[in-house]
Image: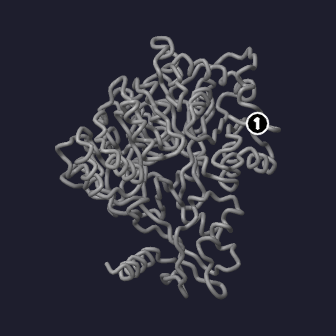
Amino acid sequence: MSLIEHRHTPNGWRIRWNETLARQARADGWWSDRTAADALLEVATVTPDRVLLVDGETQITAANLAAQAQQLGCAMLSRAAPGSVVSFMLPNWHEAAAIYFGATLAGMVAHPILPSLRDHDLRFMLADVGSRMVFVPGEWRGFDYAAMLARVTAELPDPPEVVVLRSDPGAHTAYEALHTEAHRVSLPALDADDVRMVMYTSGTTGRPKGVLHTHNTLGALIAQIGAHWLVDPGDRWLVPSPVSHIGGSIYAFEMPVLLGTTAVLMERWDAAEAIALMEQHAITHMAGATPFLRGLLDAAKTAGTHLPHLKLFICGGASVPPALVREAVEWFDKAVVSRVYGSTEVPVTTVGVIDRDDVTHAAETDGCPGVATVKLAEDAEIRARGPQMLVGYVHAEDELTAFDAEGYYRTGDQGAWIDDNHLTVTGRIKDLIIRNGENIAPKEIEDLLTGHPGIAEVAIVGLPDPRTGERAVAVIVPRDGDAPDVAELGRFLGKLGVARFKVPEAVEAWPALPKNDAGKVLKQVIRQKLLESWKVASGG
């Protein structure tokens, strides 16, 4: 096998490259010369009236999406060169798809950002990728995004243009204005190995890492889903997961174009509303973290519906209780419900167990690998590679420890094989908390909290939670007196522009943190002590 090398894509990005694996991906049909732009324009020509997205009362057809994306792509090209980054920080709104494909048609790199993030993370990401445009709501859920962008861009030496949707833009650019501009630019020819998307994921170093994907890696991911998840043209997906996550983005953007599905978007999660939408639109598929499945199941029982059109619910992104999967399979008596495993780096590493008659493996394991090759290292670390794998990070230094000598991505998770080919995630080597499907890097928050005047030392660990998957607990050594409580941590981190979901849910005050002889904090010891003390307190 040839060694991993680096090369530059036609749109100027440095990526990891293995010629042998690339040829194999093409020979196996996972990679091709067809780009996502080719697919969108083909769908708009062949089935122009097919509805791709539903956003409330708004329905976006293939022809409409292509026209909007072409106009936006030209507007983007009038401002920056192919290969530039276009960011968007939007809820699950249909405009996000037009922006995403506009960047694709322009040969640019789409950069989805979670709307729950705040100044601290946003400032870092926009500077890190040199974003040229950023699309935001003016206001959403009572938060003023336009004001935040004014603050953040004022601190950047080369700020992006800010485009505001569904609100008065103020000093920023109105989204509608981009659709009325006249342009003479031509959309560029694209290469299937061009970098198409950068998506940030929390790393154990505390600094988010920008994951790079191409037309081909995302195309392979969607082809795998089409092959394994009971997807037929005309199927309808409910999409409550954020479109700024890898899951939400593929269900809302990629699959309607590449697999002939329709995405029904939810701006915010409400289980009762989800049931109504699923019945109204005869939803066949849904995917999400544990809280989505728990909420959907409870709401379905309350409504007395078994969702007869539902073919598949894919659950991942956090710890999934086996009992929940069994309960869901029993209630949704026409659907397959299965755990899966993956990451932004290697999305859908396992495809689950798509067999209603094998509830044991669907509930007790994370399923079988699909197109990815998975191996376990000597320390039981799960390592994966495949045609849907990232082509690198924004910064080459982030790749130094992320891959092994054979090019496998080192997940940081530990696992075991059950019955030969069913993977079960047993724990994590990486210090990462996944709550409600959101990744939280404890070190990032610990580093910020050490600036609090009442904190001498702090360690944040994740503990199992039946509702959210995990809860973040801050163990604090107070500087003087009592440790700050959760509310105070929220106020302190909020002033620093940290997203609310990253604030710990519980605080424990200890006189000292357990450490080894080298001074390293022993988080496994902390977790075990917390689990034991909480078990005693609950009478368990």
Q: Nearer the viewer, residue 262 or 120?
A: 262
Which residue lies under the disc numbered 1?
A: 168
Q: Secondary structure at mark 1?
A: loop
In x, y percent, where is residue 213? 51, 38
Q: Is residue 19 left or right of residue 147?
A: left
In x, y percent, where is residue 509? 55, 82
Determine which quarter of the picture holds residue 492.
bottom right
Considering only vertical position in the picture, is 304 above or below 24?
A: below
Q: Residue extending furthest front?
A: 303
- Residue at 58% over, 31% down: 100
- Residue at 62% over, 52% down: 117
Q: Is residue 358 left or right of residue 16?
A: left
In x, y percent, where is residue 278? 39, 36
For the N terminus, the image quarter is top left
Q: Nearer the viewer, residue 506 or 244?
A: 506
Q: Is residue 24 left or right of residue 170?
A: left
Residue 224 in view here: no
Query: Three-letter amino acid code at disc 1?
Result: Asp
